[in-house]
Amino acid sequence: MISHDEFIREITLKICSSLEIKESLQNAFEYLKVHVPVDLLTLFILDTRLGAVRRVANALESSCQVTVPDEIIPLSQGLAEKIAARNFSSPFIVDPEHDEIFGALAPMVKYEAVTELIVPLRLKGELLGGLVLRAGGKDRYSAEQVELLGGIAKPFAIALANAMAHEDVLRYQAILLDDKRFLSRELYGGAAEDIIGANTGLRHVMEMVRQVAPLNNTVLLLGETGTGKELIANAIHFSSPRKDGPFIKVNCGALPESLIDSELFGHERGAFTGAVAESRGRFERADGGTIFLDEIGELPPSAQVRLLRVLQNHEVERIGGKRAIPVNIRVISATHRNLQSMMTEGTFREDLWYRLSGFPIMVPPVRQRKEDIPALVRHFLAVKSREFGMPLPPSVAPGALSRLMEYDWPGNVRELENLVERELIRHSAGPLDFDSIILNTNGEVKAVAAGDTAPQCPSKLDQAISAHIIEVMKLTNGKIHGPGGAAELLGMNPNTLRWRLDKLGISYRRRERERSNAGK
């Protein structure tokens, strides 16, 4: 029989033969099977955080029919703590019939018709995991073999610690790469974008932003779809002390209900089918920064409960996790829905509403800030022209801005942006007259969709001329002659314009005065 010292020396060389733990374990297996009965060699970690036994590597004959244990064996409540508390220090043969711990593991590990010997692996007094030798049949290991295997605990413990450290390095590397990809998609630039209308239609909103940005409280943005709530959230974050931290955006309405908990709060490895690695949720990613929960009214009740706990305790618990993870975040939420009505209907939690609505900000729709439309049009023209590779934005036809300002914009800023893009495609050389927004014969404006087959202008020439003159007259407040008058804008003689107004039956100031004098 081989001497103890020689056996330990050779097995140490085998386990140190490669940086890849699976290859090292296979080399050790090839050596061990010459000296002791072994059909399967398994290196495992006791993961108390996950509450499971996790297999690091297996080694066995390619022709062996022994069932390989699952990669993760979940432990019942408190069992991991019992294993850690048990003073496993020397090799022992598993006895599932008389041992509470291994009896509980028997249904998952399947000890029938095999003998299993475990070598506990400790480093600096801490139980890291173990080395399992499994051989088919009963009573396969002698007392001398158990004593011999006691000497391999140290080299395997070092190998296991190195494997765990290498796994941590790879995990943190993956986290950094994941963060880089994630934040490159989620973050805006280094500063807040200019808000169009900050000094006009959004003056009151920006004043509230300046008040709340330096603080750390929750903010609820209310307003119709397409009003720019995300830009306001962006302005709050980049005007706050958290501006150097992450700004994570979540569209709650776009997440499948089955994935919401995992996406927001993360999950542990093995928490569910397909969870092959641990994953941090959006709240963990936002640590030290701000998380923006758009369409908060779309959250299902289960996610509302977990969100409330995050707001109350400032900590998250991953799916399948056993511990709470503290997070330092600011929460900004937004919705176009009436959350108070949803509370009455029982679809939104009242306590969550009070947590989120500490500082509500109402973002007005475009129809309530029409003075911002010219600036918005210029902004989108500049942005879209750059996107399309145009050297300069095309000009806007006279009267077109007035037509845009008369429209109510049910789709708000998003609809205006889409209209500008469509006009640039259709009339890249300019001028842009925005004839997708047309006047009805009664003077009202309406939008015509891009795919509509309806005519894009009045059916008669006089109607078209009348509509255009009306627009110009409104733009000049009825002024006909002189600088800035309708005649100058239309390139007509003032007397010719008055004749045209009379012919078309369009009222103007002088004719109204003449009618008034005639009636006296």
Image (cartoon, rainbow, N blue to C red):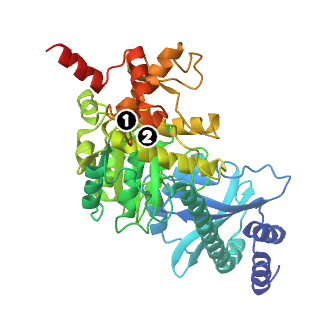
Q: Where does residue 75 sit, x and y in percent of width and height?
A: 51, 53
Is residue 286 depicted above or below 156 in this figure?
above
Q: Is residue 467 left or right of residue 480?
A: right
Which secondary structure, mark 2?
A: helix
**Mark 2 neighbour density, 10 Å: few (under 14) some (14–19) many (20 or more):** many
Which secondary structure, mark 1?
A: loop
Residue in view at x 63 percent, y 37 percent? 425
In-front residue for pair 253/371: 371
In-front residue for pair 48/454: 454
- The residue identified by callout 1 is 481
Q: Where does residue 500 sit, x and y in percent of width and height?
A: 43, 20
Residue in view at x 46 percent, y 26 percent? 468
Q: Amino acid at mark 1?
A: His
- The residue identified by callout 2 is 413
**Mark 1 neighbour density, 10 Å: few (under 14) some (14–19) many (20 or more):** some
Q: Quadrant of the N terminus?
A: bottom right
Is residue 308 depicted above or below 35 in this figure?
above
